[in-house]
Amino acid sequence: MSPGLTLVGQSGLTYFGRTTASISHELKNALAIIKENAGLLGDYLLMMEKGMPIDPARFKTVAGRIEDQITRADGIIKNLNRFAHSVDDPVKAIDLNETAGLLGVLSQREAAMRQIALQVIPQEGTLTVTTAPYLLLNLLGRCLSICLQHMGAGKTLSVRVAKEGDKACIVFDALDAAALASAGSFPGESESALLSAVGADCRLDGNQGRLIITLSNR
Amino acid sequence: MRVLLVDDESDLASALAERLDMRGIEADWVDSGQEALERAATVHYDLAVLDLKMPKIGGLELKARMQARYPHMKFIFLTGYGSEKDFETVANDSGEQCYLVKPVEIEDLIRLMNILTQDAGGRP
């Protein structure tokens, strides 16, 4: 196996592990809230059985919390399913808006932990590219992590899908160009191997504070 | 016993606080490390239950800062991860295995609270 393929494989496994760990944490939180609030409902019932009056509004509030968390957990599992199926086809035509959207939901927690708001801006309509879906997601995930590492708390990172001539782009916007420049060598070996595997180029626009990934194989 | 619950999942912290209150444990809750530091400056707590992963001030940092100011306080970590690495991090940092994996059984939490406060000579 070539060194490039080995790097792609290692990077892919790392990204898969990191992402599923983050998703499992989110699910655990949702389940913990459901369990605690279900327990609280049980406590209310015990109190009522002992003749203590409980305001029905309290039941409504707690039941509402449980419903919210079930909706949250359902969304998390749907995203996990989409992520898992991204490895189904080594190469296929994909809508870049959907990939950016999935990247956004998978990365929300990572951004939130750094107190950075994450905003995904789709291209109007669909923007189809033929590429390796999972490897592209892996590349974009690495880029997003690097951007987050070099942004201050309280800022907003935009991930924008755009057309550039006959090419398709993903633009990471509102970066601190100076901080990103001090990040050392970007793209590193793994990012370079992924760029090559998905047929993409990347460039840093220091003046605009942007990292741009360009896909040529539309 | 008076405890402070700190978790960025406010629907978890508030429900847990209410359930502890029903069991005779005075429990307050906040949803950030900063709020925890502010609250602890005005209220005497015997013990704090901290989420390990929180934005800005995580559980381990919060514990270090609170312990420096309030050496009597005991700490229990809650973690959603449950990986070996997380357990080692908490155990190594605290010197004792005072963590629970979410979702927690409230009886387990109260048992651990009692053990820690009894060790400290506090009321069970």
Image (spheres, grey):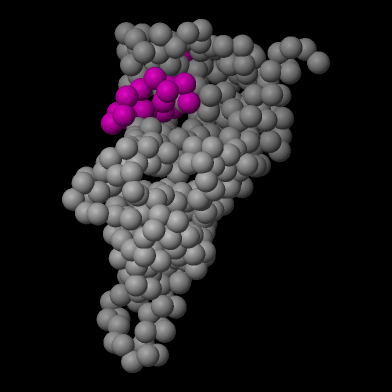
Residue that sits furthest to the left in the current view: B42
User: Where does the image place residue A51, in percent across and percent down from the top left?
Assistant: 33, 92
As drawn, is A59 to the left or to the right of B105?
left
In this orientation, which residue lies closer to the viewer: B59 or A17? B59
Residue A7 appears in the figure = yes
Q: Give the range drawn in magenta.
A: A145-167
Quadrant where the N terminus of chain B sits is bottom left
Residue at the spot x=33%, y=21% of the render? Answer: A174
In this orientation, which residue lies closer to the viewer: A108 or A207? A108
User: Where does the image place residue B19, in percent across and percent down from the top left?
Assistant: 38, 70
Q: Does the magenta stretch include residue A150?
A: yes
A59 to A110, vertically: above or below:
below
Q: Does the magenta stretch include residue A77?
A: no
Residue that sits furthest to the front in the current view: B121
Residue at the spot x=35%, y=19% of the render? Answer: A175
A99 to A184, vertically: above or below:
below
Residue that sits furthest to the right in the current view: A1
Residue at the spot x=51%, y=10% of the render? Answer: A186
As drawn, is A144 to the left or to the right of A192?
left
User: Where does the image place residue A126, in percent across and percent down from the top left?
Assistant: 49, 34
Residue B11 appears in the figure = no
Quadrant where the C terminus of chain B sits is bottom left
